[in-house]
């Protein structure tokens, strides 16, 4: 049964059974108790929500007892009040009550209707940007008169245009809304993807890769922005892990699709890869059309022809969605979903030095297994496997990847460790790269296949880092820019990674593997530096916060709500 937030402030002190005495406290008494308690490592912890809170606006001690209760807070409600233009402002209510069971039911509905379809759109992205790997297994390079270096150049062009489109695309998405911009992107790139069926030489390959990069760039941060409207910060990492599970599931599905499409031949027995591009582009186009009618603007704007005249949620569910998200991250109410980021706000976000170490991570941490992922088809063909067996033999790598992604994301939340897991991922890659470099050149093709598969299946902490980026940004304007800039760094890493294996270095790429080993060690160091930096920033903020009186803290929280991650009560994830 819900308890009125004006009367109920739960604490777990020494005796878990003693919280009933706190239910009779007034707001003023509870405020005083909370502010007088140690905010770091204290045994007195305010219950912030009916579910476990992950708000970055307060320093949390040990987890409070889980209770069916409305949001209970020791902070002034003005801290959470959204701007009048915020799309959910009419559902904001500091006195609103709901139970934990009601919240879980709402989240489950969001998962099915929002997160699942976001995964479908990501499937479409990866289908069209990744099928070039299957195309190379069907002698596309020979048909177009291209070399491995030409292929590298085409991939570099793709990632460069993808990179440069990231930030403009994110700004457009923030201006017109991701529910409008994402379908436009999908339909546009599906047309170009299908047109790859008609290329005749490397110039056509370069041109279509450039167009694909321009149209697909920004899709990932656009979708992350869309998901942030619906989920609390602690819920986002596991949903993003589903996002990247789809990434690898697409590789598995596309391997089977390629097995079928590549059997469709032209009259001369060649060109199955042309049908691959045409048919998979058509699939993406159909998903894009559905997205245009399915994706709602926000939790309180779900009515529509495909979504029903009454929408997906009733008034009570909308109030739960709005209030729980704003309690978790008040900055989400500082802008509405059709509000552009001004040049001034853009500059403020770009110069946020607390995000720079994350950008540096994005530039290198994914490189160690990038060449293996891009060249797996060519390498397996060079080891003597047939076109069709080559595509099927890539599937185990993606299965390992999916398992690692889910397990490592769960571990990050279960043990509250994030950046140190990145060190483990780099160590995994380093060991396998050393093995590839040191095994005999006349070793069995199956031995090399096992090592390549394990390297491609390297633990993928991308979902964890994206969640850190979103959380540590601390404001909507910074989050909008930070997710785009981080993804730009990731695309830059793809450019670097796709140029490490060179034609003159094949078939075993000894020089390239040594470069990858060095980058693995470098990335381990950056993960450790990032961990130390954020721990230090939290201690620095804590020292200032501890010196404030309860009245100063209360006044500070209300008067500095727009400072984002520069508030001294902000806690960085690490």
Image (spheres, rainbow, N blue to C red):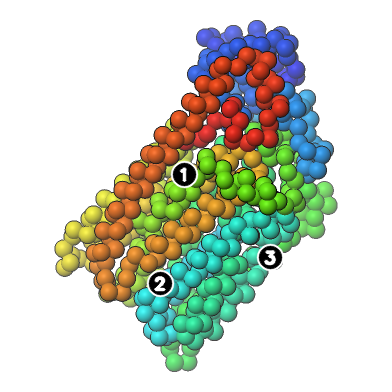
Residue closest to the eye, 99 or 229: 229
Which residue is under mark 2? Answer: 152
Q: Is residue 452 visible?
A: yes
User: N-terminal of the two: label 1 or label 2?
Assistant: 2
Which one is in front in this view, the residue at disc 2 or the one at disc 3? 2
In this rendering, is residue 1 above or below 505?
above
- Mark 3 lies on a secondary structure that is helix
Q: Which mark is residue 357?
A: 1
Residue located 44% across and 61% down the image = 494
Judging from the image, what secondary structure is the residue with disc 1 in?
helix
Q: Residues within 10 Å of mark 3 (few under 14, many from 20)?
A: some
Q: Nearer the viewer, mark 1 or mark 3?
A: 1
Horizontally, residue 361 falls left or right of residue 567, namely left
Residue under pointer 3: 184
Give the spatial CA distance, label 1 vs label 2: 28 Å
Within-10-Å neighbours for mark 1: few <14, some 14–19, many 20+: some
Disc with the residue nearer the chain's start (2 vs 3): 2
As drawn, 278 above or below 425: below
Q: Position of residue 37 (x, y in %)?
A: 57, 13
What percent of the width, then of the height, locates residue 497? Answer: 39, 62
Image quadrant containing the N terminus: top right
In the displayed structure image, the side of residue 379 where residue 315 appears, left or right: right
């Amino acid at each position: 049964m819900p308890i009125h937030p004006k009367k109920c402030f739960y604490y777990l002190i020494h005796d878990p059974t003693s919280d009933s005495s706190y239910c009779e406290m007034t707001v003023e008494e509870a405020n005083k108790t909370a502010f007088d308690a140690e905010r770091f490592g204290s045994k007195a912890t305010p219950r912030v929500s009916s579910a476990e809170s992950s708000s970055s606006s307060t320093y949390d001690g040990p987890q409070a007892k889980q209770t069916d209760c409305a949001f209970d807070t020791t902070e002034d409600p003005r801290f959470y009040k959204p701007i009048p233009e915020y799309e959910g402002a009419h559902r904001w209510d500091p006195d609103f009550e709901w139970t934990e069971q009601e919240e879980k039911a709402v989240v489950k509905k969001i998962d099915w209707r929002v997160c699942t379809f976001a995964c479908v759109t990501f499937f479409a992205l990866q289908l069209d940007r990744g099928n070039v790997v299957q195309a190379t297994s069907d002698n596309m390079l020979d048909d177009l008169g291209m070399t491995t270096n030409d292929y590298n150049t085409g991939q570099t062009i793709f990632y460069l245009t993808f990179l440069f489109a990231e930030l403009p695309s994110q700004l457009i998405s923030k201006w017109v809304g991701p529910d409008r911009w994402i379908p436009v992107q999908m339909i546009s790139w599906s047309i170009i993807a299908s047109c790859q069926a008609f290329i005749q030489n490397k110039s056509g390959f370069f041109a279509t890769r450039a167009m694909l990069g321009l149209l697909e760039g920004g899709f990932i941060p656009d979708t992350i922005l869309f998901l942030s409207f619906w989920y609390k910060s602690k819920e986002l990492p596991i949903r993003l892990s589903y996002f990247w599970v789809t990434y690898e599931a697409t590789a598995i599905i596309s391997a089977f699709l390629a097995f079928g499409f590549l059997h469709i031949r032209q009259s001369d027995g060649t060109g199955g890869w042309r049908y691959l591009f045409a048919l998979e582009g058509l699939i993406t186009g159909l998903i894009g059309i559905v997205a245009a009618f399915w994706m709602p603007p926000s939790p309180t704007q779900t009515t529509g022809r495909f979504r029903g005249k009454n929408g997906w949620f009733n008034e009570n569910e909308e109030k739960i969605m709005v209030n729980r998200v704003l309690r978790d991250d008040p900055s989400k109410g500082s802008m509405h979903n059709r509000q552009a980021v001004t040049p001034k706000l853009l500059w403020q976000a770009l110069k946020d030095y607390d995000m720079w170490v994350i950008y540096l991570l994005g530039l290198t941490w994914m490189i160690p297994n990038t060449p293996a992922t891009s060249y797996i088809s060519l390498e397996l063909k060079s080891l003597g496997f047939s076109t069709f067996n080559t595509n099927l033999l890539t599937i185990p790598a993606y299965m390992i990847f999916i398992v690692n992604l889910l397990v490592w994301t769960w571990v990050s939340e279960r043990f509250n460790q994030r950046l140190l897991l990145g060190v483990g991922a780099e160590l995994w890659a380093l060991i396998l790269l050393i093995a590839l470099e040191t095994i005999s050149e006349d070793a069995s093709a199956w031995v090399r296949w096992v090592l390549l598969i394990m390297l491609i299946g390297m633990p993928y902490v991308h979902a964890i880092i994206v969640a850190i980026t979103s959380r540590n940004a601390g404001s909507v304007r910074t989050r909008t820019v930070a997710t785009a800039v981080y993804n730009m760094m990731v695309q830059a890493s793809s450019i670097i990674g796709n140029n490490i294996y060179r034609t003159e270095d094949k078939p075993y790429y000894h020089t390239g593997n040594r470069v990858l080993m060095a980058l693995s060690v470098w990335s381990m160091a950056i993960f450790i530096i990032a961990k130390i930096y954020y721990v230090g920033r939290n201690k620095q903020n804590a020292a200032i916060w501890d010196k404030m009186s309860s009245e100063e803290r209360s006044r500070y929280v209300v008067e500095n709500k727009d400072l984002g991650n520069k508030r001294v009560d902000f806690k960085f994830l690490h």
